[in-house]
Image (spheres, helix red, strand yellow):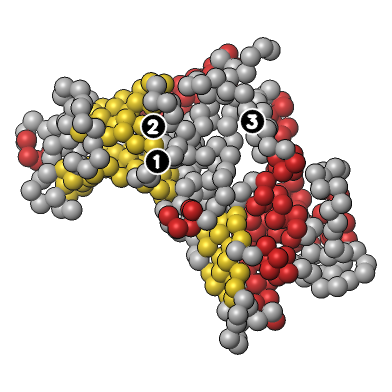
Amino acid sequence: MDDLWLLTSPSYFGFEGINPLSTWFCYDKTRSLILVLLEVHNTFGERHVYVLKAGVGEDHTRPEGVDHQWTFPRQFHVSPFNDRSGYYVCAVSGSSHPQSVYPNTPLPTIRLDLLTSDRQSKLTAITRARTSEPLGVSSLLTTLIQHPFLLFLSLIRISYQAAKLHYTKRLDVYPRPEPISPDVSAEKSYEAVANPPQEGEAIGAGVGWQPEGWIHLRSKARVHEFLEARSKTMNLTITLIPSNPIDVRRTYNATDLTTRTLIIHYRSPLLFVLLFVLPSPTHTLLLGSKAERLFTVSDEELFLEVFEPQPRTRISGTQRFRKWCLPTTLPPGNLSSPPVNALDKDMMWDLEAILVIAGYYGMEWIERALYRIFRARFVSGEEPWNGWKRLDRRRVPEQSPGIGSMRSGP
């Protein structure tokens, strides 16, 4: 690769607004296009890159005037009103190297057609460069004056269209799934998830995850501290493998030669939060792994053994708070709770644990309340706060093929 050009909507003094797509054009030393990178963004701050190679996997036929065209399966959650099934058809025009045709610089156009899983047309989006001029004082000042209005107008327009689709067209909201891991072997370790990506050869992966909040960071720190000591007392090796490539892969080794190993693949740092806020590792395994598919373990019995608390007869105040926050009826009716959580430092009242528990359930309550106030709707059975119900019975949302999650009636 010798040169790289970017077609995007720039940020304005740090404010990026809603920028669905940034397109990177990669050229070799002969100024020939070799790669097109589609960097797709969603409103959750996540990013996914589709890697399109010039001359590789292109469609056999393409419209007149189109330089390159690819059809590939969808993997990333963008619109809340669509699942991740279906295909993209990406058509690129005007992709010649800018300096190779100077002074008539090209004006690239990116056309994306969204197809359903049976390859029926569903939506078309076009990004095109209308002008191309060198950056100077005049053009810079014009951009600085005009750009903030364009950013805020885009935000208003998208919000208006979203409200129209939800309240007028009756399209329900799909909850946000975790991005696809760039580690293919790690991705294969996960079980089937709700809102799965389209089957087919993946040509990209997630490159941007949501930033971790205070609750995630404190829970993660507590789990890491616990596993550091636990691996030595139990004389075993514990490996944590995240989907997020920016996150650190951690391995805790015992001092002696070990024969037992526990490997945990996780999609989200919510794993650490569940270990901290739920009463037992059994609760975490059922909700986080079986119901929500957030993580997998190499050995379930060893996982339960690692996070099993020390024997105790009197229940702690922190554990009482955990049990009080749980739903009154859990699907496994005989699911019991130990007197303490293995991560607690104080045997009666762990202030940090109480703050994390209150924060976790408080945010869940606020989210649920806001949806009720605005009468917003998730796809039936996929509400974020109904994980325990999904464990008991996975519901299939009513869908209209090719349209999304349509609800009939009032």
Say which residue appears at 29% left-offset and 39% top-offset: 23
Of 294 and 38, nearer the camera is 294
Residue at 47 percent across and 39 percent down: it is: 197
Answer left or right for 12 relative to 228: left
Crowdedness of circle 2 by 10 Å Cα count: few (<14), some, many (20+)? many
Q: Are marks 2 and 1 in contact (CB under 8 Å)?
A: yes
User: In the structure shown, which secondary structural element does the residue marked by tag 1 occupy?
Assistant: loop
Q: Earlier in the sequence, mark 3 or mark 1?
A: 1
| Disc 3, SS | loop
Name the mark on residue 200: 1
Q: Are marks 3 and 1 in contact (CB under 8 Å)?
A: no
Asked if labels 3 and 2 touch by Cβ distance under 8 angstroms, the answer is no
Residue 396 image label? 3
Q: Residue at (58%, 19%) from the top-left corner?
A: 406
Depicted 173 relative to depicted 394: above or below: above
Counting from the top left corner in percent of width and height, residue 247 is at 49, 60
Name the quarter where the C terminus is drawn.
Answer: top right
Residue that mark 2 sits on: 87
Q: Residue furthest bottom?
A: 256
Above or below, 407 relative to 231 = above
Q: CA distance from mark 3 to mark 1?
A: 22 Å
Instruction: Return the disc, 2 or 1, that comes first in the chain's sequence.
Output: 2
Name which residue type carries label 3: Val
Q: Position of residue 165 (x, y in %)?
A: 54, 19
Instruction: From this view, report whether residue 135 is shown above or below residue 266.
Output: above
Expressed as whole percent of the image width and height from the top left, the position of residue 309 reads 79, 69
Q: Determine whether, in the image, residue 358 is placed left or right of residue 251.
A: right
- Could you classify mark 1 by the number of other residues whose Cα lies within 10 Å: few (under 14), some (14-19), or many (20 or more)? few
